[in-house]
Amino acid sequence: MDLWQKYNCNACHQVYGLGGYLGPDLTNVYSKRGPEYIAAFLKSGTQIMPNFHLTDEEVKSLNAYFEIMDKTGKSDPRTYKVNNDGTIE
Ligand code: HEC
């Protein structure tokens, strides 16, 4: 994801369990918060998270990224079931 790298979101956030620890893990932020919340959040920033002055296009592609990641990854490995033979469900 180019924007993720361009704005260095990774410095503060984890996705798929990788990245910085200052901000929350964002792997499942899409189902947890929804696209409207994320868009509003990215547009305004907080005291800790900078406002990157993203365009609507950029917010849209970041949301698309979060949506795909939400479907393909889980931020908390404890939600997996580990079988006796070592495989994971
Ligand atoms: C300087 C560190 C920093 C950077 C860089 C950063 N964030 Fe954050 N982000 C935070 C912090 C800290 C929070 C938690 C809110 C707070 O405490 O202000 C947060 C919260 C969020 C949330 C809301 C999560 C939730 O569950 O409410 C989203 C979405 C998010 N960031 C996306 C991004 C994206 C996308 C980028 C890159 C464009 C980015 N962040 C870059 C620090 C950062």
Image (cartoon, helix red, strand yellow):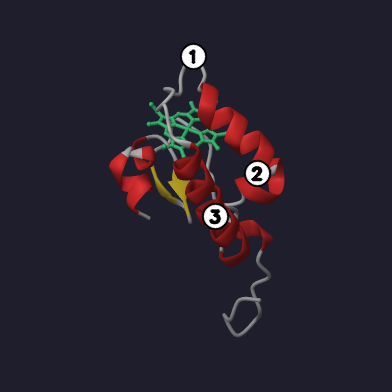
Q: What element carries label 3?
A: helix
Q: Where is residue 38 in the image (x, y as percent from the top left)?
A: 60, 37
**Amino acid type of the residue that numbered disc 3 sits on in the rendered structure:** Ala
- The C terminus, quarter of image: bottom right
Residue at the left extreme, as displayed? 6
For label 3, the residue is 64
Q: Distance from label 2 to label 1 (Cα)? A: 21 Å
Q: Distance from label 1 to label 3 (Cα)? A: 25 Å
For label 2, the residue is 35
Q: Position of residue 41 (x, y in %)?
A: 58, 29
**Amino acid type of the residue that numbered disc 1 sits on in the rendered structure:** Gln
* 10 sits left or right of 48 in the view: left
Residue shown at 46%/19% (left/top)?
A: 48
Disc on res. 47: 1
Q: Nearer the viewer, mark 2 or mark 1?
A: 2
Q: What element carries label 2?
A: helix
